Amino acid sequence: QVQLVESGGGLVQAGGSLRLSCVASGITFSNYARGWYRQAPGKQRELVAVISKGGSTTYADSVKGRLTISEDNAKNTVYLQMNSLKPEDTAVYYCHADRYIIRRYEYWGRGTQVTVSS
């Protein structure tokens, strides 16, 4: 059974930092494109950052220069380092794994809440 488990969310003041972790079990995480998404109340889920199988990264314009996605393949884990946080970063952050071989394999974590106070 595949599981993605996020941790590291919490309440932080504007300008502060958090590091989110996502540990995968049941899959070799590095064989997937791995991403972080977020969903704020009343808004659609949006892509924050993605790291490919090859290690290349892509970021939403709104987080460039502040959030960094990274991987530790030995631990089957991806991270999201979040610096210079803003109130508009408040959301539930979800971990995602995606792969297409003959058919699509896609998995989501349950999310971790990040709240940034002004």
Image: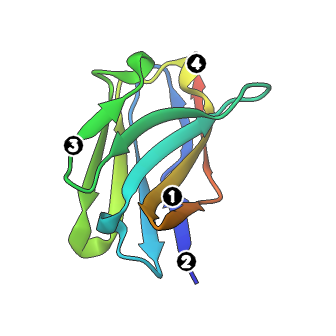
Q: Which mark is residue 88?
A: 4
Q: Check if mark 3's residue and mark 4's residue have beta carbons within 8 Å.
A: no
Along the viewing direction, whichever of 6 and 98 lies nearer the viewer: 98
Labels 2 and 3: the sequence-earlier one: 2
**Crowd class of label 4 (few under 14; some 14 to 19; many from 20; radius 10 Å):** few
Residue at mark 3 to residue at mark 4: CA–CA distance = 26 Å
The answer to which quarter of the image holds residue 80 is: top left
Q: Check if mark 1's residue and mark 2's residue have beta carbons within 8 Å.
A: no
Helix, strand or loop at mark 2: loop
Front disc: 2 or 4: 2
Residue at mark 2 to residue at mark 4: CA–CA distance = 31 Å
Q: Label 4 sits on what residue type?
A: Glu
Which quarter of the rendered picture does the N terminus lie within? bottom right
Helix, strand or loop at mark 4: helix
Residue at x 36% of width, y 68% of height: 29
**Crowd class of label 2 (few under 14; some 14 to 19; many from 20; radius 10 Å):** few
- Farthest residue, direction front: 102
Helix, strand or loop at mark 1: strand
Labels 1 and 2: the sequence-earlier one: 2
**Residue located beneath label 2 in the image:** 2
